[in-house]
Image (spheres, rainbow, N blue to C red):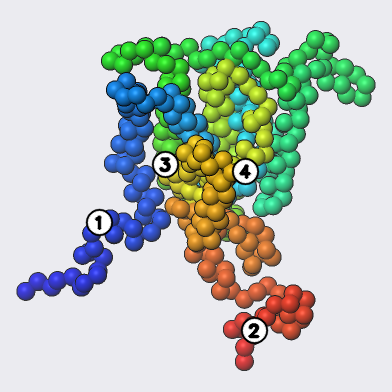
Amino acid sequence: MSALPAPGSQESAPPPRRFWESGPASWNRTLTSRRVMIPFFLVALAVPLVLQWVEDNSSWIGAQYWTLILATCAMYACLAVALNLVVGYAGLLNLGFIAFFGIGSYAYALVASDQIHQRYPLWAALLVVIAVTLAFALLVGVPALRLRGDYLAIVTLGFGLIMRDLILDLDRPPVLAGHQFGPDTLNITGGTNGIHQVQPFSLPTSLPLLGPVPHYRMYYWIFVGFLALCIYCMLRWRNTRTGRAWVAIRDDELAARAMGVNTFKYRLLAFSLSAVMAGIVGMINAAQIFNAFPSPNFDVQTTVMVFIMVILGGLGSIPGAILGAIAFTVPPFLLQQFVFYKYLVISLVLIAVMIYRPEGLLGTVSIRPRQTMGGTLELITAEAAIEASELPPVTDAEPSDLEEATGAIVEDPEWKQP
């Protein structure tokens, strides 16, 4: 007789239950496989056509409205994936990330409008955006990436704030030590007004079998296509020597350096690639809305929002970044009728996720203070967090002294108990 599997065993469970019990690591492997990603993007590309069909065959009006919302969602998904590269893969707290989105937007606007009387073709404008964004990434990354943790976050945050003020002040000739650089009519960025009448991409307005393609639908497809390209590159990088070096640096930079990994080079590479991806997203956004504005392109709130998307979905998780972008972009539009309560509901959901899933919905990495490193904010895996919590504290102070100083009950660790 053949032995039957025990009741409740992994083999006897149905596939959905086995998938649910396999954990976040297995979820990410499954969701990033070809049999899932290819149908997902095919469905995403077909959504505007389905919305238009529903509108043509019913009294419902809203195909363009919801396509624009989904385009915004796809844009934030691209930003979340790009930020996940530098935060979730390499473990760098870049709080000036959104500045590169603004730099790409303004770089394209300058060479595709009458602001400086230059109108480059698409391929030349793309090269300009990549070169300018990469130059700024190296400018801030080379000195800043020798720092880590909170110090790196503060430096990158300062960079984002400086770039916003610079964009606002370049509507007039810069003055340094009483000397004016440029004529009185110099206006590079337009200040608070931004740059208007930006030329869209020179793309066909009609496609075979589909007929005329509206502007809003074309740019939705561009965002989805660029998101697919970013995910493809991320999945390819993850299994290379570079991807393994990023993960090693994120988990333990000191151990990675001891094993011969050039930590500065790989940190700078992740920082630069993430910046270039954000710059290209800014370029697409400027072409879509025909303008480049300082807000929200350089707002700290936008950086925080993209960070929330990444942390909500899960650090180091590509499907989590997409899920976080959807969860933080679409619900506010669905809750428009609850003007006074929608952000309260979203805040309660975020608090619940942070309490019960500190690694995010699909993530295996969390941001938390590591006690063995003196409370420094680090990116560590869930398993490392459990191991760190079981280690003895770094202080030799007696429990009585700690109780007197903090007012909390402190028990002796196992290694000090007789």
- Helix, strand or loop at disc 1? helix
Rate crowding at label 1 as few (under 14), some (14 to 19) or many (20 or more) other CA atoms within 10 Å.
Answer: few
Image location of residue 200, percent across then percent down = 52, 14
- Circle nearer the N terminus (2, 1): 1
Q: Specify the quadrant of the image occupied by residue 199.
A: top right
Contact (CB < 8 A) between labels 2 and 1? Answer: no
- Circle nearer the N terminus (2, 3): 3
Contact (CB < 8 A) between labels 3 and 1? Answer: no
- Circle nearer the N terminus (4, 2): 4
Task: Give the residue at x 55% y 54%.
Answer: 348
Residue type, mark 3 in image: Leu
Q: Residue furthest right?
A: 178
- Tell me the number on the disc at residue 15: 1
- C-alpha separation, residue under disc 1 versus residue under disc 4: 37 Å
- Helix, strand or loop at disc 2? loop
Rate crowding at label 3 as few (under 14), some (14 to 19) or many (20 or more) other CA atoms within 10 Å.
Answer: some
Is there any visible trace of residue 218 in the rendered image? yes
Residue type, mark 2 in image: Asp
- Circle nearer the N terminus (1, 4): 1
- Helix, strand or loop at disc 4? helix
Q: In this rendering, is residue 5 above or below 167?
A: below
Residue type, mark 4 in image: Val
Residue type, mark 1 in image: Pro
Image location of residue 52, percent across then percent down = 35, 23
**Which one is in front, 147 or 361?**
361
Would you name the residue on which mark 3 appears?
Answer: 235
- Helix, strand or loop at disc 3? helix
